[in-house]
Structures are given as structure tokens and as C-alpha cells.
Amino acid sequence: MTSDPATWLYPTPKGLYCEPGDFYIDPSRPVERAVVTHGHADHARPGNTSVMATQQTLDIMQVRYGERAGTSLQAIDYGESIAVNGVDVRMAPAGHILGAAQVIVDWKGYRAVISGDYKRAGDPTCAGFEVIKCDLFITEATFGLPVFVHENAGAEAARLVASLAASHHRTHLLGVYGLGKCQRMISLVRAAGYDRPIYLHGALQGLCDYYASQGVELGELRPVADETPETLKGQLVLCPPSAIADRWSRRMNDPLTAFASGWMRVRARARQRGAEFPIIVSDHADWPELLQTITDVEAGEIWVTHGREDALLHQISNMGLKGRALALVGFEDEGE
Amino acid sequence: MHAFAELMNRLAFTSSRNAKLDLMQAYFRATPDPDRGIALAALTDGLNLRLPFRRLVAELMEPHVDPVLYKLSRDYVGDTAETVSLLWPVHNGNAPVPSLGEIYETLQSIKRADAGPVLSGWLDALDANGRWALLKLVTGGLRIGVSARLAKTAIAQAFDREVAEVEEIWHGITLPYENLFAWLEGRADRPDPGDTPVFRPVMLAHPLEDGDLEKLMPGEWTAEWKWDGIRVQLAGNGQELRLYSRTGDDISKSFPDIGDAFLGFSGVADGELLVLRDGNIAPFNDLQQRLNRKSVSAAMVKNYPAHIRFYDLLFRHDADLRTLDFTARRAHLEDMLAANRFSRASLSEVIEFESFDDLTVLRDGARDANIEGLMLKRIASPYLAGRPKGHWYKWKRDALTADCVVMYAQRGSGKRSSFYSDYTFGAWRTSADGADELVPVGKAYSGFTDAELKKLDKFVRDNTTDRFGPVRAVKPELVFEVAFDAVQPSTRHKSGIAMRFPRIHRIRWDKPAEEADRLDTLKTLIAQ
């Protein structure tokens, strides 16, 4: 029975369910027992009773949800193994954001890896992806099209720093996802030699403080709220992507609007967002990384969750592997 | 090639005119010959590389990518050149990146059989942006929102010159424009176009504002009708003839009938290009059928015959008349037309008047829909480049107006990127099921103050019913009094009409949407 994993690990309306362990992975609705891969809102939702995740993911959930993060929070370190109703649950770094983990489920000699969101490229703000050989690998497919090949993140950040030097009269307004991308971009521009203060939209402050408390160097950060259009001239300002089109951005004079996301690879998408300066940096695996990972884990069966699964499933079958689209509700395709 | 690719990439994402000029100026100052000249050609008249690159690219791509994945990718990306640039397999080799000059020179003389391997080698050497720029370059049509005139403005400004100085010699110089840059950098004299029929910067008019008329003396001014066509310049040296738009684009190829009709013309003349059928000027829409066409069919020429109504003469043979006053130039123009008897030519009529009141009556009484209003020209003025103050005025007919309901709003760009500043509005009609429905009749983004824009933006945000990317649908509650110059029939719009130059005249916060105008009312305004 274990040889067909679908008999004991399957999607339900509440999310992916492990029947013998009686737990859900990244449930989309409140459940009794949740195992959470990482802190992004479409994976870590409030209102579960018992939550098992890395300490950092639990911390992030508490920063975001406070009391609603869960009734009982159980931290599990990378590499540590915990038995849940006879099922062995373990975590390994996913390389996605701070605290992000792949969930390794061993039951009756069969191993399934639920990778959550992941990337293979280096990232100074989180632990790097670890290859876990397994029988079943469950992968995301956010950038599951061969056109998605991300640029070198350091070089992209250097372009931004060069533009700050060249267009010193313009505020550079960078739209970033608040958890992970924000801190990674700050860390990258610091590594590219930018040492002036960086200004933050209020919504980004809390998680930056948390990253800094975890030893991620972000340099001097200042709230935008205290500034005027004049003092922001030529400065780097970070905000959530939605704030660029919002009234909030009117406090800046004719800013240069930049977005950092894997979607920026495609011009029509970048233009749709109104990006004047698209930066192709992503926390999700690009196409070559997806294929590399599928090869590396040596799994006989690959399930594909959210994203562009058509192309990836076609490729998996070209690779002689068994693939399956896993229709899971609640994950945001656009959430980068 | 790297600098050019970076320029293309930045321009493609930049909406502000000034920011585009900054980017181009920096490029032209920093890039050596001949690369910058080739870039300039690509940004202005195009490189006209005559190889079947689309087919070539498809051939090159085939061995590298699974057809299913190619199709899914192409559908997602929406552009072949971009798809190929992204799908091209990455080589971490160290093939040398070609320079723009090298690319151009190679493609000029390449044999069809060699083109594939050569292109393939370049694609291997370039990064994704470089591949995109290269493919855009060789397939023609950069589509990065830069007009030829903007590129010319950029090179002039980059070296502290007037764009008119560049325009005057533009059509007498050729790629890679090394003599142009030598002059701009002060290393040589301005290139001499010889007797090439080059473009001469045109003289433009200011709109006549309230109160202007009281300051003018009727006896110092002459008046002509302002025709609704496109302003053109005809330049010839007796053998060669060229037709230019008012921005200096060579549009000769779109109008072979003009080329034939003015064979042997020697000089430079200013006029309005119109479609004239059986002695009557056709609506602007008809002229539009003839614009921006690379090849012109015989049927096109027959059904939409082009004609020039002449306003002015700048050169007669090689004698420069521009310093003469209007009367003297006009005498030369009349004399030139009488001497040549060109078909497809007519003289713009000079309107007799005693007082400006006479003109007001004439202007308001003009029945012809192709008359936009009157032109007032100061008799003593020479023919001056650009839009000098106090010499020529355009005195448009009073606009038509209609009350329309705001249906959609789109976010602006640049300084307006946080504002819903572009509005689509509609008029009422009776739908198939008998109920009233709104149908879009036009779009406008001007005619309001900054304070009004803030209020409109708030209305849009508070009354959104649906979102489509940067566009919001709003509750049909707000009425605009829209001003426009004319209504024309249109097969491209659902409403069957198109407004010419719509702008927002007044915001009618007070007016109930049900009382806005009906489509049928707008249709009665269609010019006969």
C-alpha cells in the first residue's frame, strides 16, 4: 500500500493530508495539526491548533499573527526528526526564505519530500537548499516554463546600485514582497557596496527587525514616514509592490519604480506592473533549477503543486519520470 | 553591443520623455563610432536588413527546444523575438561579444547560407537582454516608444545643439553618421548635404488664447483656412523628390502618387496633405488609410487619391526664401504653381477681411467639416523654425461637446502612476433586450486640474466594480462634459463612432448619469 503514496498522502479541500500521521502540510484552512514549510501567508495561515515548523517560521508567524499563530507551537530544527503517530517527520533547508524547510515524511520505508517553495541559488539571508533523495518529490512550479531563467542576483543588485549613482536626483522606489525578498534585496545591495541608509515603508519594518535579530546584516534602515520628497531624492526606498500604485507613493517626487521578482523576466509582465526598472531576482527555483532538483532527488514520482504545471509535467514525462498535477487550493501563483 | 542592449532595455521600460532623452544622451556621448551611428539609424529610419530572419530564427531554435515547451512559452511571452532570446540555451563559453558595428557590417554582406551559423554564434555570446536587442534589431521594428524625432533631439541635446540644426542635414547624411558626430563634437564642420532634397524645420503656430485677438492689428495679419489633414513638406531638386512629415520623417514611399505628380519640382514647399476625391476633401479617416504603409496598392492610390494644398514656399530651386515676408513668399508660391501646373496641387486660399469680427463670422459659419478653423499669419514675419511666439496663430472652431458617463479608468504613467488619470467614457443606447446600456465612445486624459485629478482618483477608488490589471471599471455615476473637434464614423469601435481630439471640458459632479447623452445624438454630429 505504501508503494502508491496517493493512498496515504493526498490533497483535500483543507490542503495536503498525511493520513497515518493525521496532519496537514501548509493547510489552507484551520486544522487540528499543521506542519508548515515557511512563513509566507499562502503557506502559513493563522488559526491552526497545533503547528509544527522551524523556530524561525514559528517566530515569523508570531510576528505576523500574534496569538493566532497557533495554540500549541512545536519547533523542529533542520535535521531533527520527530515521530507523529508513527510517521517520521523531518525538516531540511529549502533555501527559499529565513526558516523555510522541506518536510521529509518517512512511513513504512517510503520517503516523500514536500519541498514547499524553494530555490537553489545562493542567498545570504537563509540556509541553502539541501538535496534529499526520496521516492516521491513534491515540487512547486511557480516558474515552470523554460523562459524563466533568473539573472545572477548579485549582478542585478549591482545594476540597481549603479542606477542610484547615475540617476542621483531620482528616488529609487523598489517594490518587494515583505518577507524574504525585502531582506534579500537589502542584503544584496549592501554586498554590492551600497552603504547609505535604506528607507522602508512601515509594513516592512517588523520583519526586517526580526531578520536583523537573527543575525542577518541589513545596515541602517529608516522609516519613510519621517521624510519629505526632498530628503528622499536619490535615496533607495523599499515598499510592498501594491504601495507603488497606491496614494502612499505620492510622498515621493517622480520616483524611478523598480520591482524585484522572477516575473520581471517577461517584458509584458514587467510593463503590466508599471516597472521602469525590472530586477530579475526570485526566491523561487527557475526552470533549470526545477529540472536540476528533479534529477538530483532521484525520485521515481514527481508531484507538481502550484504554478505552470503543464510545461513541467510535459518535461517530467520527457525525462522518463512519473508526474502528477496536484490540485491544491489556496496557493498564490502571483505571490512573489 | 552590451551598451546598446542596455539602452534598448531601459528605453523599453521608461515612459517619461525626459528620462528617455537622458538615457539616449548618455549613450551617444559615451559610445564610440561607428556603433553609436548604427544605434542612431536603428532608432530613426531603421537598418533595413534584408534577410529572412524570422524563418532563420525558427530554424535555429528548433534543435534546442521541445515544440510543446516552445509553444507554451511563446503563448505566455507573447513575442517571438523575446521568446527566443529567453529560450536560447546558455553557454558559459567565452565567445567574444560582437560590437554593433561588427554585427551591422557582417549582415550587410552575408550570404543566406552563412546567416544561421553567424547569428547562432552571436546569440551564444550574448546574455538575455543582448539576445533580445539583437533579435529586435535584425527583425526590424524596435518598438520601444522612441520616435525618430526624439532620437534626433537626443543627439542634438547631448552636444548642446538645436534639433533643427540636425534635422536640416539629416536626410543628406548616411549611416554610420561619423561626419555628424564629428561636427557635434566640434571636430569638423557641419556636414554639407549638397543638393540632396533635405528636410527643413517647419514653422508651427500657437493656439489663439482668450484676449490675444485684442492685442493684434487686423491690417498686419493675413488669414487662411486650417485644413484637417497632415502637415507636409515637399522637397525636390529637379530629379529627386521627397515628402516629409512635419517631424522630418520621410514618408515618400507611402505616397507614390505624390512622387509622380510633382516630378521635376525644384525647391521646398509647405502644405497640407489631404485626400481629394472628385474635387472634394475626404474626411481625415480616409487620409488615415494611407498613412504608415510600407507598400501601397494601386487600389489604395485610386480610392484615396492624395493631394497637397500649399501654404508656403521655403526654397525656390536653391534660393532660400525663408527670410522674406509672407507676401513675398506667397508671390513666389503662386508663381511656382502657375508655372508648373502640377496635378494634385492647389493653393491655400487667402481670406479677405476688414476686421477680426468679419473673421469670427467666417470661422463660425464654415460648413466644411474638414476645416478645423483659421490660421492667422503675421504678414511681416519670415519663415521661422519651430514654434516662435507672436508670428502664427491657429484659431480653431469652437469645440463640440457631449455629456458622457465615465466607465473605466486607467492608471497613468510617470508622475501620474499612482493616479487613475485616463478615462474611458460612454453614451447610452438601447440594447438588444430593450434596456439602456452604456457603450464606450472615447478616452481622455486631459482637461482637468491637479486638484480635480485627486478628486477623480478618489471617485475611481471608491466606486470600483471590477479590475483588469491597471484598469478599473467604475459604477456608471459620474458625467463628463467632453469637448471634441469632430465625430467620425469608425468600424474599429463598438459604438461605430470615433471622436477627434476628445478632452474633458467640465466634470459634472452634479449631473445624474441617466441624463447623459445618447449614442444616437452623437451620431447626428458625424460630419457630412
Image (tube, rainbow, N blue to C red):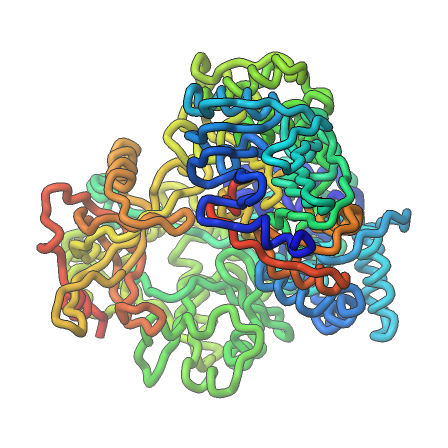
Task: Name the residue located 10 percent from the left edge and 42 percent from the top edge.
Answer: B510
Could you say which is closer to the camera, residue B192 or residue B54? B54
Q: For residue A115, which quarter of the picture?
A: top right
Residue drawn at x 53%, y 39% as measured from the top left:
A22
Judge by depth and name the residue closer to the eye, B274 or A171: A171
Residue at left offset 31%, top offset 45%: B446
Q: Along the line of sight, which residue is nearer the eye, B400 or A266?
A: A266
Residue A237 in the image: state x and y as whole percent: 54, 24
| One can see residue B185 in this view | no
Is B225 displayed left or right of B48 in the figure?
Answer: left
Quarter the C terminus of chain B occupies: bottom left
Residue B523 occupies quadrant? bottom left
Image location of residue B114, percent across then percent down: 87, 70
The percent position of residue B266, horizontal first and vertical second, equals: 57, 70
How many numbered circles are shown?
0
Vertically, is B239 above or below A209? Answer: below
**Between B238 and A8, the one nearer to me in the picture:** A8
Q: Is residue A306 above or below residue B50?
A: above
**Residue A291, position as x, y percentages in the image:** 74, 52
Asked whether the viewer can see residue B272, the reply is yes
User: In the drawing, does residue B354 fall left or right of residue B195?
Assistant: left
Residue at 80% from the left image edge and 59% from the top image edge? B104
